[in-house]
Amino acid sequence: SLNSNYLMQGGAQALQAMSITDAQIQEYVHQYVTQLDAQSTVLPESNAYTQRLRKLTSGLTSVDGTPLNFKVYKTSDVNAFACADGSVRVYTGIMDVMTDNELLGVIGHEIGHVAMKHTKKEMRTSMLTSAALEGLASTSSTMATLTDSQLGAIGNAVLNAQYSKKQESQADDYGYEFLKANGKNPRSEERRVGKECRSR
């Protein structure tokens, strides 16, 4: 019947989502970030915004074994996000309204989501609900090249991630300790990420 076929397809998709590896998630997210970088205005190393970000993130090279890479997007949006592949993107809009310590606090928070594997869990959840991601995970060791619709679905998962209060608190705590361990000192008066930035 139609219902049983639907349930079988849903079950297969759930099995794929559970079986996808962390390495696959990182690779698929990396494909999305590569496309997003190409479509965005990424400021060069000589730009004052990029120089400010480089100074703030000096020494932050990896988290939980994942190499970090930082870029600035020229856009008035007040936002920043970090992805499972270690990509951290900061918008000029948020840099315009935050002090260095506030911005460092946001970056630490976003990195916390990566370290706590919240971004990977969100990706698996997205696979359960997005038809565009159906069949993306497989038993093959070969990484798939994603279609535009699959990249779009990953983009939605990345940019619209919804974290629980517990996950937000975990990201705060991890980010603070991570920054302290790397010689950074975000002060307690930093703004809560909440309305200022949608966590990834």
Image: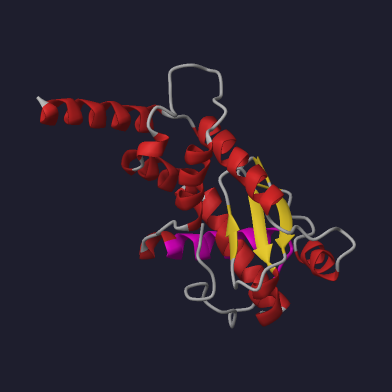
Q: Please give the name of the residue rendered at 73% of the width and 56% of the height, measured from the top-left corner.
A: 71
Give percent across and percent down for residue 132: 40, 38
Side of 66 where 148 appears, left or right? left
Quadrant placement of the N terminus: top left
Residue 186 visible here: no
In the image, 7: left or right of 34? left
Residue lying farthest to the right in this orientation: 46
Main secondary structure along the magenta-highlighted residues = helix
Foreground residue among 129 and 139: 129
Residue 46 inside the magenta-drawn segment: no
> Of residues 59 and 72, which is closer to you in this image?
72
Question: In this rendering, would 174 be left or right of 162?
Answer: right
x, y percent for residue 165:
37, 65
- Asked if the magenta segment contains residue 184, the reply would be yes
The region drawn magenta spans: 168-186
The image shows residue 76, relative to residue 177, as above or below, that is below
* 122 relative position to 46: left or right: left
Quarter where residue 124 is shown: top left
Q: Residue at x 59, y 83 (%)?
A: 189
